[in-house]
Image: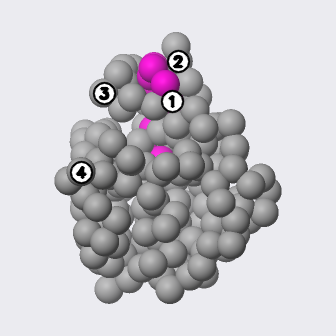
Amino acid sequence: MFITHPIEPVWDENSTVLILGTMPSPKSREAGFYYMHPQNRFWPVIAAVTGGTLSYANGEGERAVEERRALILHAHFALWDVLAGCDITGADDASIRNAVPNDFSGILTGSHITRIYCTGRTAWKYYTKLCERTTHIPAVCLPSTSPANQGRWPLAKLIEAYGVLVE
């Protein structure tokens, strides 16, 4: 089934680093914000590399969303996804078909973004294939924060890899 990306990007004119996922999971679409599956490790990793704190768990409604939005903006990050829409089954990136990229022109011209990082190979693959020739900014592929990646990427190793965001 074709899913249209329902979540606005998080950014402001002070953003210097753009972090891109592939497409929001069903849990994230339900919550109306990024990486809201309770087992996804994105937010603990971002809090660790920025020195921020998380008082609310994923799923604790608007308070959790606003806390995470503030964490991203305070670090001068921007957060979005590569795809504006696609056919996808659940949260399975491997099932993606008919991918349509987001238009990054507004976010790139309205901010100071000079670096782009993708949270996993699938996001990086679609960004490289569909977006890089128009943005003219190559992306760096970071490991996925998905719980399915836990065996190869324990939390401490993820935090170390994501440290590049604040260098």
| Magenta range | 81-90
Q: Of the residues tagged 1 and 3, which is closer to the observer?
A: 3
Residue 29 vs residue 61, the one in the foreground: 61
Q: Earlier in the sequence, mark 2 or mark 3?
A: 2
Q: Earlier in the sequence, mark 2 or mark 1?
A: 2
Q: Is residue 75 above or below residue 122?
A: below
Which residue position holds label 1?
85
Residue in view at x 56 percent, y 49 percent: 38
**Percent x, y of residue 42:** 46, 60
- Residue positioned most to the left: 152
Residue in view at x 42 percent, y 79 percent: 49
142 with respect to 69 (left or right): left
- Is residue 112 located in the magenta-colored stretch of the structure? no
Please tell me whether mark 3 sits on a helix, a strand or a loop. Answer: strand
Which residue position holds label 3?
94
Q: Amino acid at mark 1?
A: Gly
Which residue position holds label 4?
151
**Percent x, y of residue 158:** 30, 66
Which residue position holds label 2?
2
Mark 2–mark 1 CB contact (< 8 Å) = yes
Give the CA distance from mark 1 to mark 3. Answer: 15 Å
Q: Amino acid at mark 3?
A: Ala
Q: Amino acid at mark 2?
A: Phe
